[in-house]
Image (cartoon, helix red, strand yellow):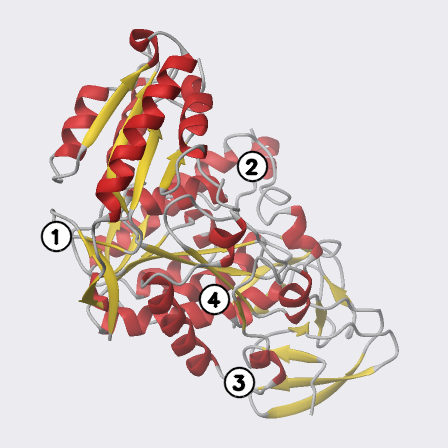
């Protein structure tokens, strides 16, 4: 199976071809938004980090920005900074340039304020979009797809239909030589023993237990029951009672392929196949983590109807709930509810999910892209703002 | 034929409703290809769970053949099984605080 994508100099393949305007620090988000909103073909990444944080978290910001800049869906990159942030821009720019991309840098305090930087940024972006638009899609095998997997606004149908269907799609992609990334470590709690059985070796199994232990200890450190936070209030309304129940449904996304490796948040896999990445379950942080890890498509299962998308990686929404498919029809791409009635099967539904992903990878637009609902972005931090 | 609820594993002691169900109704419950019938003692909203038999206080709740929590009180057969009578065994920072 093949898709039509954009070849990048470092050997990766994009499913989109944007000029990315990346914010280096929370303080310049306005400028980034202003530039991106004035130029067709440009996308922005804004976040709330980059200053007054522990060195550990500043390191996470640097790595996330490098990963995002290197994401194959970006043709070229403009970094906007204020001039006094903690983000290490020398490292970020050097590492993104190492992938062969053009990277420009605008410093608001040097150029002289938001208005001048915005004007200069718009003109620069226009020129870069013109360059990007000259590139044509080419045919690639689906082994070049890196698929992120996520479930959100889950109810009990999530574990019955869309999550197992993603598991089938992931198995098919892995069989074809592709990569799929499973995050949402909070939603391994209570099901980690099952995931560990899928580990390719002892070290990977231990890595899964360690990730879950770290996440559970963080949650418990506040001295409260995790319930209400996880499962969320909406999950509980949807019938999910405990984090264990939510997790058992969530890990169905892993399918049956062996788990090859365990990675830190936003780290790019250096192996093909199914891998696990540290991340929480909340949309802005996990979608950003998957994009930083190099995902060129994301598949997202929902029960109650989740609208979130990401600025430059297409997010395909699928559901097993007829109610959500009908009520949230401007957000949900695929309705798999026939599986519940017995008119469809998980293997067939999973096959269709992969086929739809290939169409999306080749340029068909997701509902999140069409509606412009692509604001779900932020970098996952571990420490306090200080 | 449309089923009312699904059992995911033979050892499970709860089923998941795939329709809004009414108290007193005899629910058609599917496990694989087999059907069984359970009289409901309470209304069960779509997507929520009910007990397939009487469950003792402290007994594990099984779904997917795995433990999803523990009964905090007796749950009679056909009753709504949810946060009011099931507690999680994981991520319980509240219990850790009581121990300290």
**Distance between the Cα atoms at labels 4 and 1?**
31 Å
Identify the secondary structure beneath mark 2. helix
Q: Name the residue under label 3.
A: A344
Disc marking residue A163? 4
Do the residues under discs 1 and 2 have CB atoms within 8 angstroms? no
- Image quadrant assignment for residue A258: bottom left
Q: How crowded is mark 2: few (under 14 residues within 10 Å), some or many (20 or more)?
A: many
Chain of the residue under the numbered disc 4 shown in the image? A
Chain of the residue under the numbered disc 3 shown in the image? A
Whether marks 3 and 4 lie on the same chain: yes
Chain of the residue under the numbered disc 2 shown in the image? B
Identify the secondary structure beneath mark 4. helix
Q: Outermost residue, right direction?
A: B24
Above or below, A245 relative to A262: below
**Distance between the Cα atoms at labels 3 and 2?**
42 Å
Disc marking residue A11? 1
- Mark 4 vs 1, N-terminal side: 1
Position of residue B7 measured from the top left corner of the image (x, y, whole percent):
61, 78
Q: In the image, A72: left or right of A301?
A: left
Q: Nearer the viewer, mark 3 or mark 2?
A: 3
Check the picture and name the quadrant holding the N terminus of chain A: bottom left
Q: Residues within 10 Å of mark 1 (few under 14, many from 20)?
A: few
Task: State the residue in front, B73 or A274.
Answer: A274
Do the residues under discs 4 and 1 have CB atoms within 8 angstroms? no
Residue A111 makes an appearance in the image: yes
């Amino acid at each position: 199976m093949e898709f039509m994508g954009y070849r990048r100099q470092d050997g990766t393949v994009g499913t989109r071809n944007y000029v990315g305007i990346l914010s280096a620090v929370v303080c310049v988000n306005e400028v980034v938004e202003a530039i991106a909103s004035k130029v067709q073909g440009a996308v922005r990444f804004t976040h709330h980090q980059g200053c007054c944080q522990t060195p550990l978290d500043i390191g996470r910001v640097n790595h996330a920005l490098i990963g995002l800049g290197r994401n194959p869906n970006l043709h070229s990159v403009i970094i906007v900074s204020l001039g006094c942030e903690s983000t290490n821009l020398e490292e970020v720019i050097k590492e993104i340039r190492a992938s062969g991309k053009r990277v420009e840098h605008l410093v608001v305090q040097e150029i002289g304020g938001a208005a001048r930087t915005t004007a200069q940024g718009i003109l620069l972006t226009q020129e870069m979009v013109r360059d990007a638009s000259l590139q044509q899609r080419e045919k690639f095998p689906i082994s070049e797809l890196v698929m992120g997997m996520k479930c959100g606004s889950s109810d009990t149908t999530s574990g019955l239909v869309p999550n197992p269907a993603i598991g089938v799609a992931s198995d098919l992609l892995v069989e074809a030589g592709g990569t799929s990334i499973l995050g949402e470590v909070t939603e391994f709690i209570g099901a980690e023993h099952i995931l560990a059985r899928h580990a390719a070796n002892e070290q990977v199994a231990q890595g899964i237990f360690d990730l879950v232990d770290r996440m559970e200890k963080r949650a418990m450190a506040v001295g409260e029951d995790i319930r209400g936070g996880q499962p969320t209030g909406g999950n509980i309304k949807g019938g999910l009672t405990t984090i264990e129940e939510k997790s058992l449904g969530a890990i169905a996304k892993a399918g049956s392929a062996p788990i090859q490796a365990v990675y830190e948040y936003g780290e790019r896999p250096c192996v093909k196949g199914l891998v696990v990445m540290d991340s929480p379950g909340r949309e802005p942080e996990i979608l950003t983590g998957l994009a930083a890890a190099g995902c060129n498509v994301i598949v997202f299962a929902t029960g109650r109807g989740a609208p979130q998308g990401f600025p430059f990686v297409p997010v395909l929404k699928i559901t097993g709930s007829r109610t959500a498919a009908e009520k949230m029809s401007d957000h949900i791409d695929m309705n798999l509810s026939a599986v519940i009635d017995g008119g469809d099967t998980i293997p067939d539904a999973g096959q269709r999910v992969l086929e739809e992903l290939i169409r999306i990878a080749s340029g068909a637009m997701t509902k999140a892209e069409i509606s412009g609902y692509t604001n779900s972005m932020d970098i996952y931090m571990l420490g306090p703002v200080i | 034929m449309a089923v009312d609820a699904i059992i995911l594993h033979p050892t499970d002691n709860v089923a998941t409703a795939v329709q809004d169900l009414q108290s007193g109704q005899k629910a058609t419950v599917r496990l694989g290809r087999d059907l069984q019938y359970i009289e409901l003692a309470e209304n069960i909203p779509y997507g929520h769970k009910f007990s397939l038999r009487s469950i003792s206080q402290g007994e594990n709740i099984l779904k997917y053949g795995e433990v999803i929590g523990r009964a905090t009180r007796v749950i009679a057969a056909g009753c709504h099984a949810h946060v009011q009578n099931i507690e999680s065994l994981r991520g319980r920072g509240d219990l850790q605080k009581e121990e300290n």
